[in-house]
Image: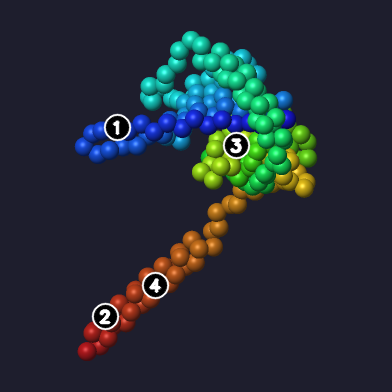
Amino acid sequence: MELHVFILLLLVHVSTEVEVEHHDFQITGCSDTEKEDMYGFDGEEIYHSDFNKKEGVVTLPEFADPISFPGFYESGVANQEVCKQNLANCNKAYKNPREEMDKPESSIYAENDVLLGFENVLICHVTGLFPPPVRVSWSKNNVKLDDMSLSQYRRNTDGTYNIYSSLRFTPQEGDIYSCTVNHKALDRPQTKTWDVNIALPSVGPDVFCGVGLTLGLLGVAAGTFFLIKGNNCN
């Protein structure tokens, strides 16, 4: 049974001197293996249900005045039941139509400037996929890693989805990290690698600059010397 997603999009108009349009949205997804219930505002996630920990998670920072109330998580559980019923009805009504699929594209990068021996975060961003779910795994020097996190699915403007996985790590010279993506639209798993290769700053330009400046000063000094000598001879 595939992931079935319902999206609720509300437009709120605020009348001031300038009219501002805000987007309030909800994504609810369900399948035999996947569950998702997320609320957002103007493209930013404000809340989601964590069905593994059985709790609601408010993701807005304190300065954004996050909202919460008892029953957030229970509402997400109820939405899952409604989603499953709608999914069963849709499959029956449309006689399990052929599913459209889009292949994901992934990229891997460090969150901050990389310094050897200092903790950092590697991010594997997967986008353009349809339908969810997608599987993301990490390895270091060909050894599988389990200490990673996975975000909620977020909808792109073209109807596909994106998701990212993050991995905390301490870079050491020569280490190679890999992010592998599995999705039904792919013929084979998609793997992107990232290696710890800190390039030392080159001293060549500085040396040439210094030599050029020194020669220039020597040239000025020599010219001044001969100019003075010439005046004394006259």
| Residue 14 tag number | 1
Q: Report helix, strand or loop for mark 1.
A: strand
Q: Position of residue 195 (x, y in %)?
A: 67, 46
- Seen from the viewer's position, the closer of residues 168 and 14 is 14
Residue bearing the label numbered 2: 228
Query: Residue at image x 25%, y 39%?
Result: 18
Q: CA distance from mark 3 to mark 4?
A: 57 Å
Q: Report helix, strand or loop for mark 4.
A: helix
Q: Amino acid at mark 3?
A: Ile
Q: Position of residue 79 (x, y in %)?
A: 57, 20
Q: CA distance from mark 4 to mark 1?
A: 65 Å
Q: Position of residue 216 (x, y in %)?
A: 39, 72
Q: Earlier in the sequence, mark 1 or mark 3?
A: 1
Crowding at dot 3, Cα within 10 Å, few <14 / some 14-19 / many 20+, comes out as many
| Residue 216 tag number | 4
Please report contact status of discs 4 and 1: CB closer than 8 Å, yes or no: no
Residue bearing the label numbered 3: 163
Give the foreground label among 4 and 2.
4
Q: Earlier in the sequence, mark 3 or mark 2?
A: 3
Question: If the image is split into quadrants, where does the N terminus sit?
Answer: top right
Please report contact status of discs 1 and 3: CB closer than 8 Å, yes or no: no
Q: Position of residue 64 (x, y in %)?
A: 38, 25
Give the foreground label among 3 and 2.
3
Q: Amino acid at mark 1?
A: Val
Query: Residue at image x 77%, y 48%?
Result: 187
Above or below 46: residue 156: below
Q: Amino acid at mark 2?
A: Ile
